[in-house]
Image (cartoon, helix red, strand yellow):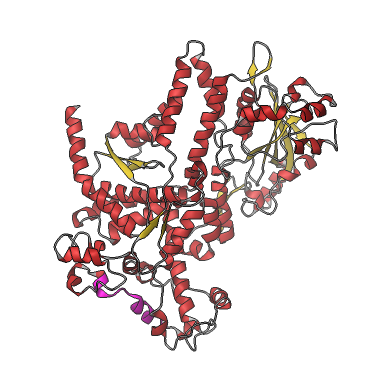
């Protein structure tokens, strides 16, 4: 054990400089991360942390052991390798596996700094803490290398989760509470952990406030006129609710509109089912508190699920910029790093690292291209119609190439002009005094503007055809919105005023406000699909397998968005807490062309029953195929047409029943203007 600690201390000492320099470089590049605490852990500790979702302490439950076992077997039998894990906190905590190489550790550190920047600045993460706007932003002054940083507000996640763990542990150790009952209650709630309203700020459910509303005289008077069961009268009704009931005083329904936060609704209005008494009874204090604990954790982890592609792509982009672009990986580490990156980007299936990185690079290239095109379209004699015939793209690329001193800073140190806005004058003076090693860290003497030009995307070899690839439609759109406030006599004059920072600045704006669904919707274009060979596929009823169905970007986009909308899970809302005026719960599946797994849905209803205490219903839509139509379609080599039918699943505590319901009762659940199904629509099983 002592030897292990000594080894960890030695590794930590070796990483002190890379950690310090990576943070400094990240800030030079315009990132404003939370501070990061780095921890050296061994193989088993890393697997435990991964199982715990990046934290050292979680509430006792069998799920963590299952995840640990899965992670360990993945490493042993599938060749998986754990490089890093970092959590969203202020300060953030990152864990480095001691057995990894120095090249791997550097890659992890640069990757983590970018993740921490994303945590600190993305507004979806701010929903949990109540942060109204991103905590860090750059100064508007182009010649100023300083950054303006607002005070960071973090979630104190490690402390929160530790308190949750202690609370649940105390309940499990309470002699008056059966540990098995606590574990079962957690199982019930975890079935619904993605059934929250992740687009709203987190706030705790205030049961006491609801009860106070119920005790008002106005509500009591109104309820006295209705022939309602005592069970229903315990519900909470406000004035708006009473006004709505005036049109139909014989039926009481709530909530006012479909409630997406199913866990919150059950916490507010649910009961536990007492099997001995054969009826619903009030939840105990420990049950209510555990409901809120697990709901709070669901809201905390929601932004990570909502931004997986963006976040991993963002971290991969800046990791590559630092490790390759700024040679953070030394010459003898580069091959190891290349192997590291190929494993990360080359994993099978929908890879958020590769998709996210490609999209961020496309955003950067597109924004930089637009900046250059806007300048060129102001040159005398250049129009959107003659653009491709008039512009010499080879000359454009040569002109945009960074000057030699930006490419080779150490070789031109004596030539650098401290008055140049691309040069950090103070750092230059220190470098000339021998206080900075510019051979290893040339970026130290450059400002943000200098680094942007040094890494300008349009002159990189892999992007040299990007400018010329712009289509006439886009040229016409850009020209339509150009103000004729500045004209250039020559192409050289126009390019002299190109804003090299536009691509990176735009990337940070997008990083602040988007999630995966809006990111894909806004920036996945036909050009991106063609360049990266993306396609949509569907299940063929006639062939019984999956086939490529389209390379149209709208189809590809819908297919991808289907996997990220609502964490890729079915969207289920609460429609009525007094269904059929009998105190039953009615849930509704918002159908988007993809059917529910009815087997899983039945099991979920059984769990929800334990949190509601009374019968639970679920409305959904299914596709049904006539066997004769299927056979005819196969013979004629065409896809059969499906019939969409409304279904109601109901669990009463003993059995699940499924019944057809009239179409008018479920028609509103079918997607209309926003349909994440792909073409042809009837191919999805």
Residue 527: x, y in percent?
50, 66
Q: Is residue 192 above or below residue 377?
A: above
Residue 68: x, y in percent?
38, 30
Say if the magenta span includes residue 393.
yes
Residue 548 seen in this snapshot: yes
What secondary structure characterizes most of the magenta part? helix
Is 342 situated left or right of 587 in this image? left
Is 3 situated left or right of 36 in this image? left
User: Where is residue 606, by image quadrant?
Assistant: top right
Q: Residue furthest left?
A: 434
Q: Which residues are magenta?
A: 392-406
Residue 207: x, y in percent?
62, 28
Is 286 situated left or right of 368 in this image? right
Which residue is rendered at x = 76% and y = 20% of the image?
230
Say if the magenta span includes residue 154.
no
Image quadrant where one finds the N terminus? top left
Which residue is rendered at x = 31% and y = 73% of the image?
402
Residue 346 seen in this snapshot: no
Q: Nearer the viewer, residue 96 or 127?
A: 127
Image quadrant where one finds the C terminus? top right
């Amino acid at each position: 054990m002592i030897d292990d600690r000594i080894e960890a201390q030695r590794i930590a000492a070796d990483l002190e400089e890379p950690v310090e320099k990576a943070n400094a470089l990240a800030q030079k590049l315009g990132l404003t991360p939370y501070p990061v605490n780095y921890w050296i852990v061994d193989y088993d500790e890393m697997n435990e942390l991964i199982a715990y979702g990046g934290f050292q302490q979680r509430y006792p439950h069998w799920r963590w052991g299952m995840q640990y076992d899965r992670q360990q077997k993945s490493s042993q039998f599938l060749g998986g390798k754990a490089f890093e894990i970092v959590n969203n906190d202020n300060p953030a905590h990152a864990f480095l596996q001691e057995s990894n190489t120095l090249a791997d550790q550097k890659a992890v550190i640069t990757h983590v700094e970018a993740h921490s920047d994303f945590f600190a600045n993305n507004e979806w993460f701010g929903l949990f803490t109540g942060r109204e706007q991103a905590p860090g932003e750059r100064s508007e002054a182009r010649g100023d290398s300083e950054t303006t940083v607002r005070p960071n507000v973090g979630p104190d996640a490690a402390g929160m989760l530790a308190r949750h763990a202690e609370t649940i542990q105390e309940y499990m150790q309470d002699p008056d509470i059966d540990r098995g009952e606590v574990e079962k209650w957690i199982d019930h709630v975890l079935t619904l952990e993605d059934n929250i309203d992740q687009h709203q700020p987190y706030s705790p459910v205030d049961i006491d406030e609801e009860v106070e509303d119920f005790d008002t005289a106005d509500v009591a008077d109104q309820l006295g006129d209705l022939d309602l069961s005592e069970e229903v009268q315990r519900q909470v009704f406000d004035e708006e609710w009473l006004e709505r009931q005036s049109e139909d005083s014989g039926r009481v329904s709530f909530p006012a509109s479909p409630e997406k936060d199913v866990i919150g609704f059950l916490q507010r209005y649910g009961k536990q089912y007492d099997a001995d008494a054969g009826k619903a009874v009030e939840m105990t204090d420990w049950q209510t508190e555990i409901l809120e604990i697990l709901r709070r954790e669901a809201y905390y982890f929601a932004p990570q699920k909502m931004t997986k592609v963006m976040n991993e792509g963002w971290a991969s982009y800046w990791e590559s910029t630092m490790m390759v672009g700024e040679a953070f990986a030394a010459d003898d580490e580069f091959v190891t790093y290349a192997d590291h990156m190929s494993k990360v980007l080359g994993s099978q299936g929908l890879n958020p690292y590769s998709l996210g990185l490609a999209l961020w690079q496309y955003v950067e290239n597109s924004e930089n291209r637009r900046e250059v095109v806007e300048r060129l379209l102001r040159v005398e004699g250049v129009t959107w119609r003659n653009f491709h015939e008039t512009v010499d793209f080879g000359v454009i690329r040569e002109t945009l190439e960074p000057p030699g001193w930006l490419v080779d800073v150490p070789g031109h140190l004596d030539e650098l002009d401290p008055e140049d806005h691309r040069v950090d004058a103070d750092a230059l003076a220190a470098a000339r005094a021998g206080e900075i090693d510019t051979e290893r860290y040339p970026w130290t003497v450059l400002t943000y503007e200098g680094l942007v030009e040094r890494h300008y995307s349009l002159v990189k070899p892999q992007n040299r055809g990007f400018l010329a690839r712009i289509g006439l439609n886009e040229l016409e759109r850009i020209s339509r919105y150009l103000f004729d406030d500045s004209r250039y006599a020559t192409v050289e004059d126009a390019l002299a005023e190109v804003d090299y920072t536009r691509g990176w600045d735009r990337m940070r704006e997008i990083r602040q406000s988007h999630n995966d669904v809006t990111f894909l919707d806004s920036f996945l274009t036909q050009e991106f699909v063609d360049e990266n060979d993306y396609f949509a596929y569907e299940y063929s009823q006639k062939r019984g397998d999956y086939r490529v169905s389209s390379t149209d970007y709208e189809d590809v986009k819908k297919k991808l968005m289907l996997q990220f909308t609502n964490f890729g899970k079915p969207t289920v809302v609460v429609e009525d807490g007094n269904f059929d005026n009998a105190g039953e719960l009615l849930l509704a599946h918002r159908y988007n062309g993809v059917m529910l797994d009815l087997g899983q849905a039945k099991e979920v209803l059984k769990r929800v029953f334990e949190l509601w205490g009374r019968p639970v219903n679920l409305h959904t839509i299914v596709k049904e195929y006539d066997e004769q139509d299927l056979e005819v379609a196969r013979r004629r080599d065409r896809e059969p047409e499906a019939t969409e039918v409304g279904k109601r699943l109901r669990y009463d505590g003993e059995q699940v029943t499924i019944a057809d319901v009239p179409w008018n009762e479920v028609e509103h659940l079918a997607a209309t203007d926003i349909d994440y199904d792909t073409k042809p629509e009837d191919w999805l099983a």
